[in-house]
Image (spheres, grey):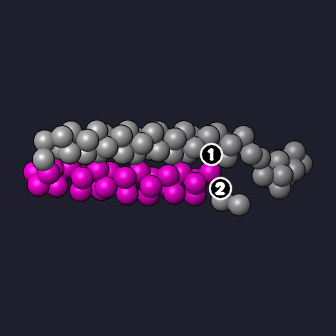
């Protein structure tokens, strides 16, 4: 099973791929007729919104992972401190 930070990395990669796809769509607009341009602009906008959502979720996962690590205690550290 992947850790939360590994899953966040996957989300980031997907977001980067979506951004590249949106940029490619936008770069080809000039070769399309007017109505097709509007449709492709809408599609690029949707892909960029999905990329933003993926990045946001990745950040949330990383924050959750940090909290989880902060609250996890190494039992060997606790037992050695308890003895002193």
Q: Which residue is mark 1?
A: 65
Mark 1 near mark 2, Cβ–Cβ under 8 Å? yes
Do we see residue 59 in this rendering? no
Above/below status of 83 relative to 45: below
* Dot placed on the residue nearer the N-terminal end, 1 or 2: 2
Q: Nearer the viewer, mark 1 or mark 2?
A: 2
Q: Farthest residue toward the bottom?
A: 1
Label 1 to label 2: alpha-carbon separation: 8 Å
At x 50% / y 56%, what residue is drawn?
9
Q: Secondary structure at mark 2?
A: loop
Query: Which residue: 87% across, 45% down?
Result: 82
Q: Residue at x 51, y 57 (%)?
A: 10
Classed neighbour count for the residue bearing mark 1: other residues with Cα under 10 Å, few (<14), some (14–19), many (≥20): some
Q: In the image shown, does 42 or 62 lie closer to the viewer?
A: 42
How far from the left and from the top, in percent, is residue 59?
50, 42
User: Closer to the camera, 36 or 79?
Assistant: 36
Point 62% across, 51% down: residue = 4
For the magenta stretch, what is the residue range? 4-32
Residue assigned mark 2: 3
Placement of the N terminus among the 4 image quadrants: bottom right
Q: Secondary structure at mark 1?
A: helix
Residue 83 point in image, percent of width and height: 89, 48
């Amino acid at each position: 099973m992947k850790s939360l930070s590994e899953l966040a990395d996957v989300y980031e990669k997907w977001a980067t791929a979506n951004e590249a796809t949106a940029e490619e769509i936008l770069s080809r607009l000039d070769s399309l007729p007017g109505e097709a341009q509007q449709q492709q602009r809408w599609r690029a906008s949707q892909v960029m919104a999905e990329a933003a959502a993926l990045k946001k979720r990745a950040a949330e996962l990383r924050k959750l992972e940090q909290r989880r690590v902060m609250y996890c205690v190494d039992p060997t550290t606790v037992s050695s401190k308890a003895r002193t």
